[in-house]
Image (cartoon, helix red, strand yellow):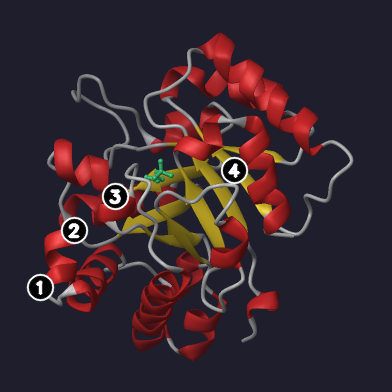
Amino acid sequence: MNKLFRSAVIAGNWKMNKTPAEATELINAIKAECAGKATDGCTVVACVPYVDIANAVEAAKGSFIHIGAENVHWERSGAFTGEISADMLVACGVEYVIVGHSERRQYFGETDETVNKRVHAALEAGLKVILCVGELLTEREQGVTAEVVSRQTKIALLGVTEEQLKNVIIAYEPVWAIGTGRTATADQANEVCKLIREVVSSLYGTAAGNGITVQYGGSMNAKNAAELLAKEHVDGGLIGGASLKAPDFSVIISAAQ
Ligand code: 13P
């Protein structure tokens, strides 16, 4: 399938930034920056901290912006102090959720197994999942990028049905490119996004592999987005720092049209 037939998704990951009042301001600023420009060539998502969800949903109402969360617990309810369930997110108007971000893997003990559990919980509740995979710098240097990314993808998708896969987006985020200003080259991004597509094809068949949206994330910004997004296997972006600046995020949205 040609990339033109896949849905492009530009998603911001706000990480631990913005108070609720600031979230309202930023969503309004993104709407203002994009006013009069085409936005229907891609799906636009803002993944925000839990406490910002209510304000972000309210500010985005009736606009082209969809709201996502940055994590979700795998249980539906119970004694899990500090955690948030998929049903809670849905009830707040959340449509997307990031699962398995490298910062969760690095700092909060996230494993391939817990990623898989979160993927299931999110899909069962009706959320769309942005599943993050990506290698460390040492792994790239050791030449095991393909093995790492394949393993992460396969384990995260264990037990996910072909029907459920339609609600999964995979974000390739090389850990060495996150927040470092060191972007993967467009060719490096394309190569691994292609590999992820092949892994999905091996699990679900060629049509599923060709149809799945694969994003690149890692220092994507207003300057390099167009080149990355032009690549055949790069269907969108998961953007950290640049998603916090409405003018920059708007340029990236335009680059995806
Ligand atoms: P940066 O765009 O700040 O490098 O962050 C990327 C990222 O981690 C998105 O999830």
> Which residue, as the protein is rendered here, is positioned at the far right?
36
Q: Is tag 1's residue or tag 2's residue first in the polypeptide sequence?
A: 2
Q: Which amino acid is tagged 3?
A: Gly
| Quarter the C terminus occupies | bottom right
The picture quadrant where one finds residue 64 is top right
- Is 154 or 180 nearer to us in this picture? 180
Q: Which mark is residue 100?
A: 3
Q: Real-space Cα distance between discs 4 and 2? A: 26 Å
Q: Real-space Cα distance between discs 3 and 4? A: 17 Å
Q: Which amino acid is tagged 1?
A: Gln
Q: Residue 123 appears at what percent x and percent y?
A: 43, 53
Circle 4: element type: strand
Circle 3: element type: loop
> Marks 4 and 1: which is nearer the front?
1
> Badge 4 is on which residue?
45
> Badge 2 is on which residue?
136
The reply, left or right, for residue 17 in relation to residue 210 is left
Image label count: 4
Name the residue rendered at 35%, 88% in the picture.
202
> Marks 3 and 2: which is nearer the front?
2
> Badge 1 is on which residue?
142
